[in-house]
Image (cartoon, rainbow, N blue to C red):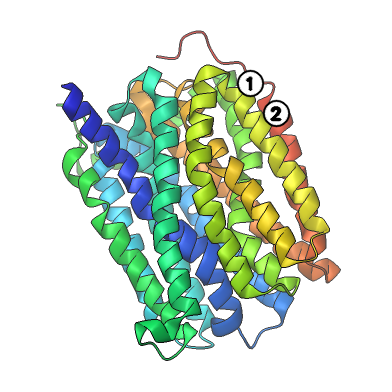
Amino acid sequence: MSSATEKRQIFSWALYDWANSAFATTVMAGFFPLFFKQFWAANLPVVESTFRLGLANTTASALVAVMAPLMGAIADKRQSKKSFLSTFAILGMLMTATLFFVGSSQWQLAMLVYIVAIIGFSGANLFYDSLLTDVARKDQRDFVSALGFALGYLGGGLLFALNVFMSLKPEFFGLAASSMAVRISFLTVALWWFVFSLPLFFFVHEPRSSKTVEGFAMVVAGLKQLRATLGKIRKLRAVALFLLAYWLYIDGVQTMVRMAVDYGMSLGLNTNHLIIALLLTQFVGFPAALFFGWLGKKWDVKKSILVAIGVYTLITLRAYSMQSSADFYLLAVCVGLVQGGVQALSRSYYTRLIPKNQVAEFFGFYNMWGRFAAILGPLFMGWVAVATGSSRSSVFVLILLFVSGGLLLATVKEPAKTE
């Protein structure tokens, strides 16, 4: 492969993060929880809408978690990671656009469409992550993984900035109300996601095997490989320990992304300030993700992840006593400093631990654990909020996840040779 082709593949792969991060920022972190509470579930009590939002995230994550390992195994057998990625991504795009048509107080329909959109988003990410080993050499992966997250922060942040401006100044765009601006934002996310996915669809080339299988035989082969991989994971101590640690600490990361706005609204903070603070997180996250990619290469990947987990723990402790929008701004900046780093380095660190010829399937387990993690966090936060009658108490769930995940990660020892 020529240097120019290699660079084009790397940039095209990383640009998909730019594309799909619009969903993560505008929809998952920003407008869906806000709109769910104020528009779709406005007739529900505050703690009940929090619980239902957590339930929607939990349901979507559970469905992806169940499907992920088998989908990965099938993709490995067919050498069709790009095909699976495209299918799930288009599903996510269509469902995101559908949110525009969900009317006031239709919280059940909003939950259903949101769940399917997350399945599309998360399913595509499984195969996107597994393509990392096809587009980047081993010595490039820390940087390339970080580049993807950095572009994600920048791209997602740019569209989110436009969407926020639309919601704050709807009259500037000829819109009658902020609610219409938010609904139109869902359409812009779907379009942005599609347009900037095209370079990956056209320019990233997945090596194909001459021994592919089709039909029911493909499913059978996938199940056999899945069973074999389960046996290997039990023998690969480093992989098993890392997956368990990742399951815990990434739960805290994903739950914070999905529930932060809801938490701030439950404390009575100004919604405009909450959205602007999330926007600030994106632009802080862009250089911070690149810095963590450099830090992982120059210092130590695992130690860099542990630093990020430690910062998350301190952020969560401060969130318990948060009183004002200024506090939320401060915490948003701190999250931006470490969020991309912990995600990017976790992904690249995992590639050092797994067999090269079963990347998609092992990433199926990686994403499965990530989705199972996202099952626990939102659900327990919602449950604690309802049980105690206080949203503040729910943050202790995150502290437990960060601390236990960090302690387990510290015990992982990278094999001398992984491929």
Which quadrant would residue 95 be assigned to in this image? bottom left
Residue 370 has which mark? none
Q: Residue at x 69, y 60 (%)?
A: 328
Q: Is residue 204 above or below residue 321?
A: above
- Residue 208 visible from this viewpoint: no
- Percent from the top left, x then y, of residue 31? 51, 70
Circle 1: residue type: Val
Q: Which residue in the protein does label 1 denote?
A: 412
Query: Which of the two residues, 244 or 323, is positioned nearer the viewer here?
Result: 323
Residue 367 lies, in percent from the top left, at 48, 42
Q: In the image, residue 242 lies at what x, y percent?
A: 59, 28
Q: Residue at x 67, y 31 (%)?
A: 307
> Label 1 crowding class (10 Å Cα cut-off): few <14, some 14-19, many 20+?
some
Give the class, few, some or many, for how many residues have Cα within 10 Å of label 2's Cα (few <14, many ≥20): some
Q: Position of residue 292 (x, y in %)?
A: 53, 31
Relative to 74, 334 lies left or right: right
In the rendered image of this protein, does residue 394 appear above or below residue 243? below
Residue at x-position 73% and y-position 48%: 315
Residue at the disc numbered 2: 408
Q: Residue furthest front?
A: 172
Give the SS element for disc 2: helix
Q: Tell me if label 2 and label 1 are in contact, CB under 8 Å.
A: yes
Image quarter in which the C terminus is found: top left
Horizontal side, residue 4 vs residue 12: left or right: left
Q: Residue at coordinates 65% horizontally, 76% vertically from top-left?
A: 49
Identify the image quadrant of the N terminus: top left
Q: Which image quadrant for residue 301?
A: top right
Residue 223 lies in what quarter of the image?
A: top left
Residue 279 visible in the shown view: yes
Amino acid on which the number 2 mark rests in the picture: Leu
Q: Secondary structure at mark 1?
A: loop
